[in-house]
Image (spheres, grey):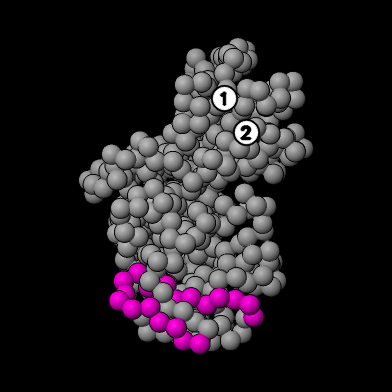
Amino acid sequence: MHAKYLYMQRYLTSLILKDLEEKLVLLSGPRQIGKTTLSKVLFPTDQVYLNFDRLSDRKMLREESWSRNVSLVVFDEIHKMKSWKRWLKGIYDTEGVRPRILVTGSARLDIYRKAGDSLAGRFFLYRLHPISVAEASRSFSAVSPDEILEKIMKFGGFPEPLLKGSEVAAKRWRKTHLDTILREDLLDLEKVREIKQIEILVELLSERVGSSLSYSSLAKDLEISPHTVKKWIEILERLFVIFVVTPYSKNIARAILKEPKIYFYDTGRVKADEGARFENLVACALFKRNQFLEDTQGMKMSLHYIKDHQQREVDFLTLRESRPEFMIEVKLSDSNLSETLVYYSARFTGVQPIQLVARMNREQQFDNIRILKAASWLVTLEA
């Protein structure tokens, strides 16, 4: 897989190429997820690439002195520039889409709030995610979906550790990856100096993947306030380290107040048991697919889990246009029918109840509930 990566086309490439003909394209996603690689294959011999972190590029950006005689201009990390959205609006309004403009960034850009009216109607937004079973299977047809699933569980879906396939290399990459995020990206976004404590928080979260989070419990472990824990978790979300899944409720306000679950963009960072790592892999695949449908089709998608006062719980519920779609329980190797899935499937109309099992021999059907081999189902997702 590693040798072929140089020729691997990421799942957003053709869509971004098409949209660049009409508007600005903003591409966000975790650090080292492949945004720069993707941008450089769009027009490989006919583009200007400018990174705001590089001093010489920063001067060129401020002077607006880059060549216009190219097919594509890539602005990387310009959200670090003061008044970047107004600056970008000025470029777009005076020069249009020739040359085409792609803007990339590794810290979470709250586009709709921060860009606001300045860029309204001028851009398409894409969010690049780790490599999933579906994406890898399309690029590496000679490798079975089951094998790909096991590799992502072991190494995570970030291109470098996954495609190198070395545990030592993955550990070294993971350490420098988090160091860079906390010592560079974090300080660009927030006036936070408790980096060591945030590192400990990441460690604690990596052991609690798939469990409902108690801010109070984490606060006690870190000897800080629950409010600070919540704030730090929000920062880690913005930095694309984790994403939050809230409990399902028709009353959205109530759902937000209930204890969330967290999952890592990097499945390889999960330090809980193998079952939690598999659950994280499925969460990543569903979250990626939801945001893909939002970014490419304008659909309203959301991801939740279900839990009632009797502690009956199902791992995931996807909503499409606010309507329940897939209800999913995940199991590492247990193919016995989940009683909670049976219970909830009788109480939701129009939902598709599925039990995904990572390692099983034979798929089964019980009334409207399907027990499926996880890799076989995940490979059918859109992204």
Q: Amino acid at mark 1?
A: Leu
Whether residue 191 is visible here, answered yes or no, is: no
Say which residue appears at 44% left-offset and 67% top-offset: 377
Image position of 23 with respect to 265: above or below: above
Residue toward you, 298 or 59: 298
Q: Residue furthest right?
A: 117
Q: Residues within 10 Å of mark 2 (few under 14, many from 20)?
A: many
> Of callouts 2 and 1, which one flags the residue occurring earlier in the amino acid sequence?
2
Q: Residues within 10 Å of mark 1 (few under 14, many from 20)?
A: many
Q: Secondary structure at mark 2?
A: loop
Say which residue appears at 46% left-offset and 86% top-offset: 366
Tell me, yes or no, whether the highlighted magenta stretch contains residue 64: no
For residue 202, side relative to residue 86 (left or right): left
For residue 145, side relative to residue 339 (left or right): left
Residue 106: which numbered mark, if any? none
Q: Secondary structure at mark 1?
A: strand
Q: Split into 4 quadrants, where in the image is the N terminus? A: top left
Measured from the top left, where is residue 105 in percent x and y? 54, 35
Measured from the top left, where is residue 162 in percent x and y? 32, 48
Whether tag 2 and tag 1 are in contact, CB under 8 A, the answer is yes
Residue 20: which numbered mark, if any? 2
Image position of 229 with respect to 128: above or below: below
Say which residue appears at 62% left-offset and 67% top-offset: 319
Residue underneath mark 1: 72
Mark 2–mark 1 Cα distance, whole angstroms, equals: 9 Å
Q: Quadrant of residue 256?
A: bottom right
Measured from the top left, where is residue 83 in percent x and y? 68, 27
Tell me, yes or no, whether the highlighted magenta stretch contains residue 363: yes
Whether residue 46 is visible here, answered yes or no, is: yes
Magenta-colored span: 349-367
Say which residue appears at 30% left-offset and 76% top-offset: 361
